Image (cartoon, helix red, strand yellow):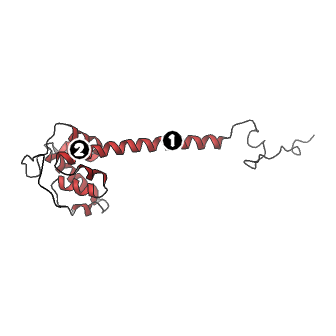
Amino acid sequence: MDLRSSRLPDDPRTGRSARQDGGPDEPDIAACSDKKETMDSTTSSLIGLVVGLIGIVGLWRVFTKAGRPGWGAIIPIFNLYLLVKTAGRPGWWVVLYLIPLVNIVVHAIVAIDLAKNFGKGKVFGIVGVWLFSIIGFLILGFGDARYVGPDGAVANQQRPAVSY
């Protein structure tokens, strides 16, 4: 009997013969891979959601300490505006965040100024607020740092209304 002529029936799922894919009793590797990818993407999404929420909480506390509206932390672009204003820079600096490469330098300057306005040094501004911003915001927001403002005068908890 010639082995080349005795062909096994095709697998209806893949269209390949059973001899090519290892036989009908082996598990479908593609199906296992899809389940793993689904689990990986769900886990990644949940981790991203938790990290994002922690960042929002930290930024909310920073804004509240600075006398700004905490809810501004959840609104895109407006949170950048509040961050720039809390750092003591003009509001139009938000536009600089839209320019590639310039935004990196601008954010480093804003981070240093924000750290100074909370009584911290340049190193904390670069490492804590610029490189590891979520951790830096949590330290500023929940730590003992007080917002002193860009002019160095200690700010009251209730600042006068700020025009936006």
**Circle 2 Cα neighbour tier, 10 Å, few/some/many (<14 / 14–19 / ≥20):** many
User: Between disc 2 and disc 1, whose residue precedes?
Assistant: 1
The residue positioned 42% from the left and 41% from the top of the image is: 47
Q: In this image, 67 relative to 36: left or right?
A: left
Q: In this image, 156 relative to 143: left or right?
A: left
The residue positioned 15% from the left and 44% from the top of the image is: 118
For the question of whether residue 141 can be seen, the reply is yes
Res 76 → quadrant:
bottom left
Which quarter of the figure is the C terminus placed in?
bottom left
The residue positioned 27% from the left and 43% from the top of the image is: 58
Task: Give the SS element for disc 1.
Answer: helix
Q: Nearer the viewer, residue 55 or 105?
A: 55
The residue positioned 64% from the left and 42% from the top of the image is: 31
Q: Nearer the viewer, mark 2 or mark 1?
A: 2
x and y percent of residue 16 in the render?
A: 76, 48
**Circle 1 Cα neighbour tier, 10 Å, few/some/many (<14 / 14–19 / ≥20):** few
x and y percent of residue 143 in the render?
A: 20, 37
User: Do residues under tags 2 and 1 come within 8 Å of each other at their CB atoms?
Assistant: no
Q: CA distance from mark 2 to mark 1?
A: 32 Å
Relative vertical location of residue 123 with respect to residue 68 in this rendering, above or below: above
For the question of whether residue 105 can be seen, the reply is no
> What kind of residue is marked 2?
Arg
Which quarter of the figure is the N terminus placed in?
top right
> What kind of residue is marked 1?
Asp
Q: In this image, 20 relative to 163: left or right?
A: right
x and y percent of residue 100 in the render?
A: 32, 61
Q: Nearer the viewer, residue 41 or 123?
A: 41
Q: Nearer the viewer, residue 143 or 157?
A: 157
Task: Give the SS element for disc 2.
Answer: helix
Q: Nearer the viewer, residue 127 or 12?
A: 12
Question: Disc 1 designates what residue?
Answer: 40
Q: Which mark is residue 61?
A: 2
